[in-house]
């Protein structure tokens, strides 16, 4: 007997018919003699609608109320899912985050799971009842509902799998697995049979929203056996595994992109010690994450230009912070640009192979695409380009690295 966590995303629960089909998958596992716990996301489009209503009234100023509104989509789908399972003759019950409880820390809107008390969920499974957990939500130290950031029900599923010491965590979604690039943009993308935790972590954090980044980090830490697979087809998905489980490692495993980027350039800041600290200190104090940074050498040793990127969400605030410090930073002027995208090439094989970055630069130059900022890690090269070239860059790179499906 295996213990399995099944997570269903929004498109897999888009309407009652979809919920019924998803419920059949859970029931099939039970009939096969396994123990199953289910985690559900909100029905497709629901969370977007809830977020839009909050924004229309008040923006994000009261993040506790934001959480109490946007978490509700999962309550609906958990209840409906439990009803669908029961209509198939198997007992089920829904669990809200606070009922389990899924204890969180770190405030509202982007809370982190601290602990899941899984005893009652285990009790359900042991007596043959399928527990259906509302994903994306928990309870904070203030005893109010919290949420985990968009896509957060993936993290609920992995955290539950870890708490239950599950043999498998299956993430059912609207694609057949993890592809070499977003299959909605790169038609020639290939499904990967396996990918390492590390590569999946980079892919997710560089924009491939097939899994929430935090869910991958958690799976890697607790060695949860994660599988991404289609809820519509009966085909094997992609296993996310440790490096030792991959026999022949590709140099490049995948390409990701993110349009959630904005660029700020400070022209003619004094070229002296302490300037970078003066810029990034106030940004950090304002809780703004800076991603890519490039600083030019100065022509005459006195002044230089400095460029950095933030998420589009933080763009306005970052501008305010920099402008509020104009006097002490002593720059001449700002250039602001939110029409940029980041494209990243990822693969653990980069550690042992030279020339990966060069192929990227060469390919983009052949397409006439200007690179604005570059950043690298051990297994990743990212470039910032004009947003209008995103698709062109992705497809050209996909071909250049030999990733196209045969
Ligand atoms: P769910 O509602 O099931 O959580 P998401 O929309 O969050 O689904 O994630 C699935 C989507 O992720 C796919 O529809 C696909 O467009 C997108 N995606 C982006 N990059 C990739 C990739 N490398 N492989 C697979 N899917 C990807
Ligand atoms: N429903 C939430 C969202 O749309 C959580 C999730 O789908 O994972 O972000
Ligand atoms: Mg998702």
Image: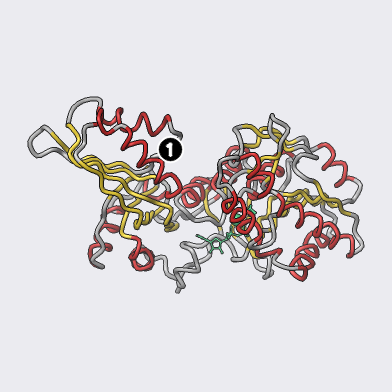
Q: Could you tell whether 331 is left or right of 357 in the image?
A: left
- Image location (x, y in percent) of residue 192: 53, 61
x 57%, y 51%: residue: 55
Vertical relation: 7 (above or below) 110: below
The quadrant where ligand 3 appears is: bottom right
Quadrant in the rendering for residue 85? bottom right
x 35%, y 42%: residue: 319
Q: Residue furthest top?
A: 273
- Image location (x, y in percent) of residue 196: 52, 49
Colour pattern = secondary structure
- Image location (x, y in percent) of residue 229: 63, 61
Q: Could you tell whether 27 is left or right of 200 in the image?
A: right
Q: Residues within 10 Å of mark 1 (few under 14, many from 20)?
A: some
Which quarter of the image is occupied by the C terminus? bottom left
330, 47: nearer the viewer = 330
Q: Could you tell whether 174 is left or right of 310 in the image?
A: right
Write down the residue under mark 1.
288
300, 373: nearer the viewer = 300
188, 383: nearer the viewer = 383
As helix, strand or loop, the secondary structure at mark 1 comes to: loop
- Image location (x, y in percent) of residue 290: 38, 40
């Amino acid at each position: 007997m295996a213990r399995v966590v099944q997570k269903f995303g929004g498109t897999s629960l888009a309407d009652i018919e979809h919920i019924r089909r998803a419920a059949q998958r859970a029931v099939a596992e039970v009939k096969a003699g396994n123990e199953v716990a289910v985690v559900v996301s909100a029905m497709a489009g629901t969370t977007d609608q809830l977020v839009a209503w909050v924004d229309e009234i008040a923006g994000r100023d009261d993040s506790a109320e934001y959480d109490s509104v946007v978490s509700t989509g999962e309550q609906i789908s958990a209840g409906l899912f439990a009803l669908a399972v029961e209509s198939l003759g198997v007992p089920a019950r829904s669990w809200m985050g606070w009922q389990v409880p899924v204890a969180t820390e770190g405030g509202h809107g982007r809370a982190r799971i601290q602990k899941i008390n899984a005893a009652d969920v285990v009790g359900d499974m042991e007596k043959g009842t399928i527990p259906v957990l509302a994903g994306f939500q928990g309870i904070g130290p203030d005893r109010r509902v919290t949420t985990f950031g968009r896509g957060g029900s993936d993290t609920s599923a992995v955290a539950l799998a870890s708490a239950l010491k599950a043999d498998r965590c299956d993430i059912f979604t609207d694609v057949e697995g993890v592809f070499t690039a977003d299959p909605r943009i790169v038609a020639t993308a290939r499904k990967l049979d396996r990918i390492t935790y590390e590569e999946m972590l980079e892919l997710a954090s560089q924009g491939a929203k097939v899994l929430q980044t935090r869910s991958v980090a958690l799976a890697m830490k607790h060695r949860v056996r994660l599988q991404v697979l289609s809820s519509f087809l009966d085909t094997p998905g992609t296993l996310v595994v440790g490096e030792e489980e991959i026999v022949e490692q590709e140099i490049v495993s995948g390409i990701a992109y993110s349009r959630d980027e904005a660029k700020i350039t400070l022209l003619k800041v004094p070229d002296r010690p302490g300037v970078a600290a003066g810029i990034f200190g106030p940004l950090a104090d304002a809780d703004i994450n800076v991603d890519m940074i490039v600083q030019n050498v100065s022509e005459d040793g006195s002044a230089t230009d400095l460029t950095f990127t933030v998420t589009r969400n933080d763009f306005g605030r970052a501008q305010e912070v920099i402008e509020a410090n104009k006097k002490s930073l002593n720059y001449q002027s700002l250039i602001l640009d939110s029409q940029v995208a980041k494209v990243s090439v990822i693969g653990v094989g980069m550690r042992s192979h030279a020339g990966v970055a060069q192929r990227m630069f060469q390919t983009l130059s052949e397409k006439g695409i200007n690179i604005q900022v570059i950043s690298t890690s051990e297994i990743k090269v990212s470039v910032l380009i004009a947003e209008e070239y995103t698709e062109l860059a992705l497809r050209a790179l996909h071909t250049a690295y030999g990733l196209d499906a045969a």
